[in-house]
Image (spheres, rainbow, N blue to C red):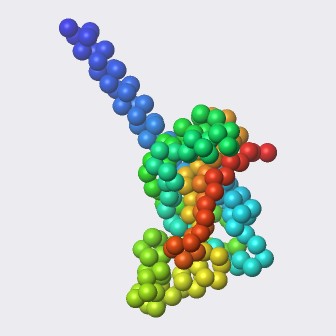
Amino acid sequence: MVRKTTHWVFALLGLLASLGCFAIWLLSWESEEYAVYVAIVRAAYDGPDISHHVILDTTEPWGRWGVTPFHSKVLGLPIDVRASYTVKNFLRFHLPSTMRLGNPYTLASENELKASYNEQTSKTLRATEPTKLIRGNWGVITFSRVGFDLHRKHAVVYAQLIFCGLCGGGDYFYLSKE
């Protein structure tokens, strides 16, 4: 009876350790994620008319259950990239304020953005500055978390640009490390 109990205890401890490692992996930010965000901003959302970026301060999971089958097929996403993307985007996370984008940027909270889009609150001092930045620089950029393959050579992320709260567009970006 003692041996069976010992096996269960070790199995339970092993399971808890595995879950703990998985949670650390899920919650941790990696420098490669910053590099993906920087590459996307520079390639898709930068230009001579842009002097300042406004970025939502939390990630936005696009599609609660990962990349759509249509987009997975079109992009040719391997199963490990899709799985990584799905797991990492299950929850929202705060973006770090340490990205180096070239142009200055402001991380705006969802509440700040709602205030700047609301007719009654958009004229308050708190909402005036984000409103000016958004209207003068194309809009607000939002990101999902980045899904990587096992060798860290490929990444997929969903990014979108929202202008007035009702208009904008987004794309999946599938990147390769060179």
Residue 61 on image: x %, y %: 49, 54
Residue farthest to the left, as pictured:
1
Residue 170 in the image: above or below residue 70: below
Residue 145 on image: x %, y %: 55, 52
Whether residue 81 sits left or right of residue 128 in the image: it is right
Q: How many numbered tags mark residues here?
A: 0
Q: Nearer the viewer, residue 118 or 32?
A: 118
The image quarter containing residue 119 is bottom left
Q: Residue at x 64, y 39 (%)?
A: 73
Q: Residue at x 46, y 91 (%)?
A: 123
Does residue 98 show up?
Answer: no
Residue 81 on image: x %, y %: 61, 39
Residue 39 in the image: above or below residue 30: below
Residue 117 on image: x %, y %: 47, 80
Residue 62 in the image: above or below residue 73: below
Q: Quadrant of the C terminus?
A: top right
Q: Quadrant of the N terminus?
A: top left
Q: Nearer the viewer, residue 19 or 80?
A: 80
Does residue 40 show up?
Answer: yes
Whether residue 47 sits left or right of residue 108 in the image: it is right
Q: Residue at x 46, y 37 (%)?
A: 22
Residue farthest to the front, as pictured:
70
Q: Residue at x 22, y 10 (%)?
A: 2
Whether residue 91 sits left or right of residue 67 in the image: it is left
